[in-house]
Amino acid sequence: MATREELMGGLQFVTAQAGRVAGLLDAANEWDTRRPAGWTPKEMFIHVGAILGLMPMMGPQVLKAPPEADIVEGIDIAESNEQGVAPMRSMDSKHAVETLSANCSKMSDWVKSLTDEQLEGKHKFRGMPMTMADLLMTVTVMHSIHHLFEAPLSVAA
């Protein structure tokens, strides 16, 4: 199980890497070049920021869900992702980075507020049983790092 300290460290790492990747994208003027996965780097930052902002709002409902209930069952993930990105698509890259960082901070504050019992609570995500701590690590840290790694890769890569 992920620990609170690992989650907090992971969220700090996400923020640091967002800044590093933003610098690479700025230097290469690559914010609006569509990537093989279908999104531009700016859209990836917006998506990550949206997820980081959504989890503290949605988290209390997840904590109440029975362990056997898959928390994303019945949700069209692609549609949900587009709904999170679309309203912010027009923001500039600097604002996208600031939003991601601010939402990462909100996520950190929420993680700090959780009890050990809540972090150890059993949940199911996409069919995989896991603790709340592992769910948060997967959705907010590992998922974010995946997109931040992908963002600076050129289309030709």
Image (cartoon, rainbow, N blue to C red):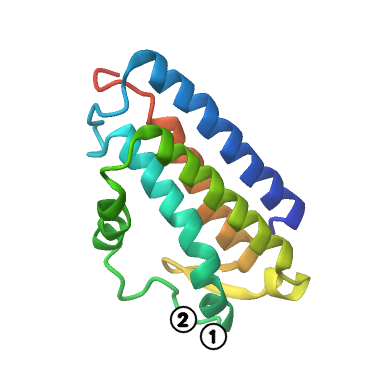
Compared with 142, 65 (above or below) is below
User: Among all residues in the image, which is located at the extreme top?
Assistant: 27
Residue type highlighted by circle 1: Pro
> Where residue 12 sits in the image (x, y, percent)?
65, 41
In the displayed structure, does residue 156 sit left or right of residue 57? left
Q: Is residue 110 left or right of residue 148?
A: right
Quadrant where the C terminus lies? top left
Residue 118 image-quadrant placement: bottom right
Please provide percent x and percent y for residue 7: 67, 52
Residue 48 on image: x %, y %: 43, 47
Type of the residue with mark 2: Ala
Location of residue 87 (image quadrant): bottom left
Q: Are marks 1 and 2 in contact (CB under 8 Å)?
A: yes
Circle 1 Cα neighbour tier, 10 Å, few/some/many (<14 / 14–19 / ≥20): few
Q: How many marks?
A: 2
Label 2 Cα neighbours within 10 Å, binned few <14 / some 14-19 / many ≥20: some
Looking at the image, which residue is at 40% across and 14% down? 27
Give the residue number, with chain letter if any, for mark 1: 66
Looking at the picture, does residue 134 appear above or below residue 43? below
Q: Residue beneath label 2, please?
A: 69
Q: Is residue 62 above or below residue 102?
A: below
Secondary element type, mark 2:
loop
